[in-house]
Amino acid sequence: MTQPSKQAADALRQAVAAHRAGRHAEAERGYRAVLAVAADDPMAHHNLGVLAVQTGRAAAGLPHLQKAVEVSPDTGQYWVSLADGLLRSGRVADAARVLEQALSRGLDPVAARTVRARITAARTGEGDGDAGAARLTAAARALREGRFAQAEAEARAATRLKPSASAGWTVLAAARRGLGRWDGALAAARRAVALAPGDAAIVSNLGVLELERGQADHGLDLLSRARRLDPAYAEAAFNLGNGLAAVGRPDDAAAAYRAALALHPTHAQALNNLGTALQAAGRPDAAVAALTWAVRVAPTYAAAHYNLAHALLDAGCRTGAARAFEMALVLRPDLAEAWNNLANLRRDDGRLDEAIACYRHAVHIRPTYAEALTNLGGALRQDPAQAEALCRRALALAPRLTEARITLGAVLAEKRCFEDATICYMQAAMLRPADAGAYVGLAHALSECGLSRRAAAIATRAIRLDPLAAEGHRVHAAVLREEGQVTAAVGAARRAATLAPDVPEVWVTLALCLQTAGDLAAAEMAFRRAVALVPGHPRGTHGLYMLARAGPTESAFGLIRTRLDDPATPPSDRVLLHFALGKMNADVGAHDTAFAHYLDGHRWRAAVRGHTYQAAAQEARFLFRRSLFTPAYFRARAQWGDPSRRPIFIVGMPRSGTTLTEQVLASHSRVYGAGELRALNNIAADLFDQQTLAADAADPRADFGDRMRTAARRYLDYVGFVSGGSERVTDKMPHNFELLWLVALLFPHATVLHCVRSPVDTCLSCFFQNFTNAHTYTDDLSSLGHHYRLYQAYMRLWKQVLPMRIHDVVYEDLVSDPKAAISRLLDDCQLSFEPQCLDFHRTDRPVKTASVAQVRKRVYTTSVETWRRYEAHLGPLLQALETPLAFERASANS
């Protein structure tokens, strides 16, 4: 069928407008004008035929109505109008035949019921030739045109004129159904059944209404009764199938649809619904066969193409499913669900741009389509702000949409807003307790919040829910690594890689676990596997070249540049790729280029994080502590702590030698290296906020001492657990330098080691690391210098006021004269000298910090005075390191 010209289309619109306005002569001229330039235009033929019937010239209208059906046989309304014209011409049998043909092609049963009622009335002589028939005809016309109020008024008039005629009550029921007046519709349908209890169509109509009102048992009884009344009535079998499908009996529904198809083998709707019933029964191949036949019988039946796509997906035929969705959209471009499902296929095939375009179509068609909004948000995760807005819009529309909460959790996690992500995942898990994906996301977010033990339990639950899902094992491995259970972490990561060997993220996680375990060769192989699967993979590439075992190649440089040139690369991936390029360029001596990439990496980090270092707030916190913690404060609380000497606290700026110091000590037979523990920070956060501390300083309370001793025991229990009962345990959390006041209160006899390194080398090494979200000061050279000055102020304060000695461990001494420096270090810890401490690089223990590769090597001095290679770029840092803090300047000026 060819498309009408613009001239014909304009003429048709004008004719339709005249028709609706009651200007019949003008409308007829317009329709004939269209046919003069487009002889096969089906709408012009149809409307001209309808106009003839409406003006009492039914016989003259029939040729046009028949032509409309010939040209466009899949338009149900054309069949209805032809049946109506035949009925008006007195050809009742022909009208019935045409109606059955229409039903077999997928005609809306509501429209069919109206015409069937009039045919029944004509056959039985109900109201024939009287005023009731005219009213009934007017009601049927109004119903067909969607004018339900007018249809109800005309049908009520028809029932008053002929109350014993079932046809009037049938049309009245349909009109009230259209108005949503269900009780009135049921009353009229029941009256029709009372008048014609042996009419299968009327009984079937009531059964459909009962089902729609939730009366499943009664509705199915009526539909079964209709089948018994007229076994040759295909529509009764079809309606029974619909009812059985609605109550979750797909096998029985399929049997009913097959009965309808035995009577009408080309009944497209029955074929379509048979396909969906078979799919619900878990028989995708049979569903595909039924739906394939449906689209052959009715090639323009969009719903059948759409359902065929779903059946093909269940049968594992993704390519065929995509074609079926595309065909459904050719026929129905406004089918939002098809756009959404086609987008899902494109997304899963890696065709993200096409997926985003399809999701946008779905949302444009239906702005309140929460699922499509969620999926679009997930696809736009390279734009975190837009992705978050879309997910929150979806949740405003559908607060119980679990997928929206999981997707929002993932978006917030990528923005490193892990506390908010945790809330989203917890809400998703409450909404859908059996959803393993919600627990996997929750475990990841909890781990990033420092709650790794809780995260491990949640990850275990996710695995129980879906033991074959690789992502659950991968996250479990990452959490176990954080917990220090490295052997178990490697095992979990290997299970993930076995389940999903083609997913690069599982190989990255395995590489990190192997790296922590000290198997750097195997870690390198795992990183390479990730990069081989997805060339330029951000985390794989970053991990591979930060490991410092792999020399960069020109092809590796090219792959990363290609990823960075792609506008679809998300900001979080850009961070990793710029840091990788920084390390790779530094390794080949291109220091200026390396520094430029580190700057870009920090710029993207700050954009992803969305908040910056707050220098004034940091100084205010220091001043509060300085005003509170005095020698007198600690003397008044000297009896609060625990006398244990087990803990060894290693503090200092990150990259100042803390990992090296711990590795040396962990090589001693009496010492366990526990790594970076969050336990001290958790105690401070749980018990000692500023308001509580200030109140205690003003009026020391006995119960506060009890709480302190309880916290100390809790800490000792934890380090005893993680160390397996070792005599001494190191806690190497660098930023515990802010919490040495708490160390002094909890463990006044503990050893505190303060790692010191050249300020510029320390800051530059920090700048070269992609630290976690807490280290906001590293994203700007001036902030980095300010933070270093503040760290120095803390250490000066503690050395002045704390009732315990702080031992300095100088990095440059360790690497220039390791034997002497290590001997002093062991003396400071009251440990005897053991030769293996000099061979610390041979010690097999988990290391999770950025120094993981360095501590596996002998002492080297190449990291001393590294900053001079980058001196031209360090002006802001050097200036900040020389600039007094605000409170220092104020003190100097007073």
Image: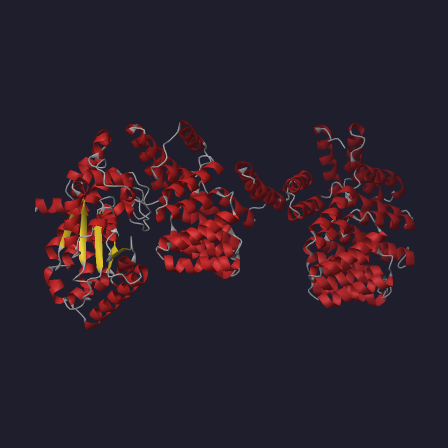
- Residue 613 in picture, x, y percent from top left: 27, 45
Q: Report the residue at 25% width, 68% height from top.
A: 710
| Rendered view: 523 above or below 438 | above
| Rendered view: 456 above or below 328 | below
Direction front: furthest residue: 835
Direction bottom: furthest residue: 702
| Rendered view: 699 above or below 763 | below
Left or right: where 437 falls relative to 628: right
- Residue 690 in picture, x, y percent from top left: 23, 60
- Residue 210 in picture, x, y percent from top left: 73, 64
Q: Does residue 717 appear in this view?
A: yes
Q: Which of 18 and 795 lies nearest the eye of the viewer? A: 795
Q: Which of 692 and 27 lies nearest the eye of the viewer? A: 692
Q: Which image quadrant: the N terminus?
A: top right
Left or right: where 646 falls relative to 16: left
| Rendered view: 446 above or below 308 | below
- Residue 693 in picture, x, y percent from top left: 21, 63
Q: Does residue 421 appear in this view?
A: no
